Image (cartoon, rainbow, N blue to C red):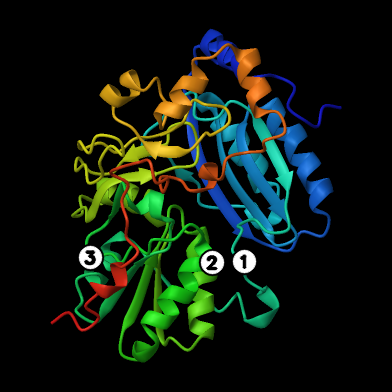
Amino acid sequence: MQLYNKLSAKERTELIEKANKDRLTLSFYQYAKIGNPQEFRDQLFVAWNQLDVLGRIYVANEGINAQLSLPADRFNEFKTHLDTISFLKGIRLNIAIEQDNMSFLKLKVKVRRKIVADGLNDNTFDVTNKGIHVGANAFNELIEDENTVLLDMRNHYESEIGHFKNAVTPDVDTFRESLDIIEEDLKNHKEDKKLVMYCTGGIRCEKASAYFKHKGFKNVYQLEGGIIEYARQVNDKGLENKFIGKNFVFDDRRAEKISDAIIAQCHQCGNPFDVHTNCANDACHLLFIQCHACKEEMNNCCSTNCKDIHALPYEEQKALRKGQGNSNDIFKKGRANHLLFKKDLRNIFETLKVDKK
């Protein structure tokens, strides 16, 4: 019985091209008590591998977080399988706004301690006491309220390429980091302000809203289904789209367009651009924004040093990396000092007018 992926990305790409079928990219999550995550993980892999599902799925005692793609003509089979699992029956699936057959090239189902690395001790507060879930229409009304503080619960490199009108976008590298910053900055407005939050698909807000209610905030709301579901409702119902730019996604698409606006810039030349890439130097792999012209000039690298290394024969590159470990730049996601036009939002809360006067 096969329990792990055995094909390389190249081999999988060839199979997808040969099949010549449209694939659907989608995501979902569910908090639920899973007694034996490893057994559940193995069952999922066997069932989904047979359906040609590819993606990144995290399973833990607290539930499941899935981002995946599958052949469009097997969607009903997939949904039928989900409905056989009690806590996934009838679950909302966030279908991607923009599709790409190559969004995922491997099926990875991993057992983790948590389905989101939130850095929180769930035993210290009631994680089920969440904020009020609102759809796109109610969300649009809320964010125009002068007593609302709209919070982007994503990381800096996500909000850099797209966010909602009037949103506070903390310049953070981790979800956990944003919680303390927000609480400190709004500590005097726990009763008079409405905290309205959003993220990509809603999962981060599930914990964040419960955390802020635990910290004493009285009026806490979260966007149901996140940016992905918001975009769908806006399109289906003809609502005003208050999202500006692209929605960052954690697959090979990198982003999906929610509006035509380009609010970011190439980190190397400063021209308007909003597509991330990874530095081609295997010792770096820094995630940063690079326009087409700079990509050609720099050979898909973030610096001249990386460009020079990437041009060396492969064996020489391996020899240089031996014993060195990964560069710290890989964790900076656009913060490296050699990127002249990286965005710095460190003082974003200094410009937040909580009284909106």
Q: Residue at x 72, y 33 (%)?
A: 323
Question: In the image as oriented, which residue stretches furthest toward the right?
Answer: 1
- The residue where tag 2 is placed is 176
Quarter assignment of residue 153: bottom left
Q: Residue at x 45, y 28 (%)?
A: 305
Which mark sits nearer the N-terminus, 3 or 2?
3
Secondary structure of the residue carrying numbered label 1:
loop
CB atoms of marks 3 and 1 within 8 Å: no
Which mark sits nearer the N-terminus, 2 or 1?
1
Q: From the viewer's perspective, is 285 left or right of 236?
A: right
**Residue type indicated by callout 2:** Arg
Residue 211: image x %, image y %? Answer: 53, 77
Give the number of the disc on residue 119: 1
**Residue type indicated by callout 1:** Gly
The quadrant in which the C terminus is found is bottom left
Secondary structure of the residue carrying numbered label 3:
loop
| Of marks 3 and 2, the one in the foreground | 2
Residue 349: image x %, image y %? Answer: 30, 72
Question: Which of the pair 181/283 is nearer the observer?
Answer: 283
The quadrant in which the N terminus is found is top right
Q: From the viewer's perspective, is 76 left or right of 179?
A: right
**Residue type indicated by callout 3:** Asn
The alpha-carbon separation of the residues under discs 3 and 2 comes to 22 Å
Residue 318: image x %, image y %? Answer: 66, 21
Label 3 packing within 10 angstroms: few (<14), some (14-19), many (20+): some
Instruction: Please say if 212 is above or below 289.
Output: below
CB atoms of marks 2 and 1 within 8 Å: yes
- The residue where tag 3 is placed is 166
Which mark sits nearer the N-terminus, 3 or 1?
1
Q: Residue at x 59, y 45 (%)?
A: 66
Question: Which of the pair 53/84 is nearer the observer?
Answer: 53
- Give the number of marks: 3
